[in-house]
Image: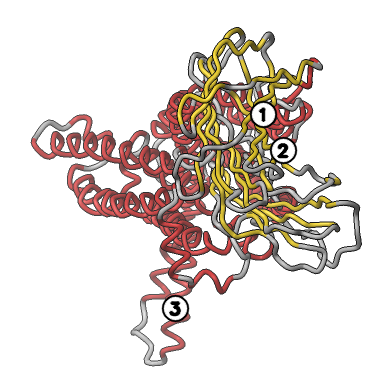
Amino acid sequence: MTATAPAPSTARARATAFLPRLALVLAAMLATLFTAAAPATAHAALTASDPTDGAVVATAPAQVTLSFSEQVAMGDDSIRVLDPQGRRVDTGELRDMCSGNTIRYGTALHSGLPNGTYTVAWQAVSADSHPISGAFTFSIGAPSATEVSLPTTTAGGGPVGIAYGIARYGAYAGFTVLVGGAAFILLCWRRGAAERPLQKLVVRAWVTLTAATLAMLVLRTPYTGSGRFADAFDLDGLRAVLETKTGASLVSRLLLLGAAALFVAVLFGVYARRLEDVGTEEEAGRKEGEKTRDTNDLTFGLAIGGAVVSGGIAATWALSEHASTGIQPGLAMPADILHMMAVATWLGGLAALLVALHKVPGIERSAVRRFSRVAFVSVVVLAVTGAYQAWRQTGSWSALTGTEYGRLLLLKIALVAVLLAVASMSRKWTARLAEAPAAREEAPAKVGTQVAAADDVSRETESGTVPADPERAAQLARQRAALENAREKRVRDADPDRAGLRRSVLAEAAIAVVLLVVTTILTSTEPGRTVEQEAAGGSAATAVPDRAVKITLPFDTGGPSGKGSVRLELDPGRVGANTLHLWADTGDGQPFDLPEIKVAFTLPAKDIGPLPVVPDQAAPGHWTASGVQLPLAGEWRIDVTVRTSDIDQTTVQKTVKIG
């Protein structure tokens, strides 16, 4: 049984009643999604600390160290240690203790700390641009009362976080409509370059993306720092932001948007005028001559230039967010660029088609058919790149169903499936548009009668002399505008197949809005693969295969001239025999000729060790040992005991993964 589209009058009535309800449903869904997205979990996470959260140590530690699952950016004030009265007891100097894949930072503590409970508060920015923060406590001697309250808010939250999040959503939406709208014009409907509604759509998308990028750049300092709007005017903070990967990406995006502005100006200026000179696309196909060739050349040039600029803008996300961290970044970043381009071409083109169907009565059926083909190619690219990204960010079925990222990904897949189902209905309406155009000639004839009647009213309105009263003149102008709008609406609604296509495209656009929001939330959610690694305790230091393990361990024995550091090298850093080298340096970088230094290796997971090693001194400040046997692969703890005098001694440690 063949479906028949409702009559135009019925369609208008239903659309009038349906649109307010659709707006309310969309608003509720967007509000729910915005609420679920705040605060978002970032990519990097704290995986270990020394002392650990809640630990009670017998003596005051010389330093506090933090380990992370991914690379983070930290400053001198990123780690603060507070005594029970809320006074800072750290030196305020950040120690970079990273080695290989081990991401660890620390800060030294003042000597002679009394017993009691101490609070460690930290804040950092993960490699995918999202701020992270936290706090924990440890006690010396025994727990005590403390006046320090652990913070209840996370970095990137509060009003500044909401404003920054809105800017992020605006940036994604602006990019999608800007790229998709331009692609729709160049690939599907060239004559649309001269249509005012499409021009407004693309220009507003450019303005939205530019404004959102500027807002993100200005809000970056308070977003990753204090959380106060006033810090948005801190020039030193802005200068620091410009030196980060995220700041460089935002500035690059603004520069590319300048090139995009030139592209838009040519598209809606020179290109639109040249199309008007040549005529409609059907006429252009029958014409031969210099104008037609010039128009085709300009179309090709705009398509290439637009692809380069839009790909560059997409790269500003790929280079600074999830694709740039984790496994296979060299493959993930190009895949992410293609993914964003496919999403923009499909969903942004859908927005342009919806505007054209509602605002432009003369859109050709061939343009709708072309968009159907472009959308199909975009969906194929989207499926391939999306499948790779899903594997890269989850890595297992359990992460797909048991983590927040995995559940959001399943929701996104479900939305894409629904969108494809609705799109298949649109393809059926598109096919009907191409069939038996002569059977619909009566409708345009009836519309012609109505339009003629409207013209009579318009001429009657305009027949008199221009009223001297400005209010009367304005009233007549409004009447003429209303008549013109009614004229265009009757032409649009005259074709029942076109009206059916318009309704199905409207449903696609509504689902696409929700899909875009879910996608934006995914970019600020900790990937499932990372969550499972943290839960399994697999975030300890990882040795690079066939490369020596190199670590640096600061120490402070507490005695006179008791501060320094030990550089340890274990070669080749794998199961079997290894060669151990140790270098001791004073605080000013000179060789430290220690009275004694010892090393022990422990594999807690297998209850192996400690395996003691007493290296031989090869030179002042340099010790070595050969044939150091590590029998099993796993996470080995290396304890280095340093003695600087007869009574001053300390042990420092680090965990590495031996393959």
Which residue type does callout 1 highlight?
A: Thr
Residue furthest out toward the left: 290
In the rendered image, residue 236, in percent from the top left (x then y), is placed at 44, 67
Marks 1 and 2: in contact by CB < 8 Å?
A: yes
Query: Can see residue 445?
Result: no
Q: Relative to residue 483, is residue 24 depicted above or below? A: above
Label 2 vs label 1: CA separation?
A: 10 Å
Which amino acid, mark 2? Answer: Ala
Instruction: Report helix, strand or loop for mark 3.
Output: helix
Q: Mark 2 points at which residue?
A: 48
Q: Residue at x 66, y 27 (%)?
A: 638
- What residue is pinned by disc 1? 655
Quadrant where the image shows the C terminus = top right
Color theme of the render: secondary structure
Mark 1 and mark 3: Cα distance apart in space: 82 Å
Q: Residue at x 69, y 41 (%)?
A: 650
Dot 3 crowding, Cα within 10 Å, few <14, some 14–19, many 20+: some
Residue located 32% across and 42% down the image: 309
Q: Quadrant of the N terminus?
A: top right
Q: In this view, does 580 lie to the left or right of 39?
A: left
The residue at which mark 3 appears reads as 476
Mark nearer the viewer, 2 or 1: 1
Helix, strand or loop at label 2? It is: strand
Q: Reading the chain from its start, which is encountered first: label 2 or label 3?
A: 2
For mark 1, give the secondary structure. Answer: strand
* Residue 210 visible (yes or no): yes
Q: Earlier in the sequence, mark 1 or mark 3?
A: 3
> Which amino acid, by three-letter code, is at mark 3?
Leu
Q: Position of residue 232 (x, y in %)?
A: 52, 69
Query: Which residue is nearer to you in this view: 599 or 181?
Result: 599
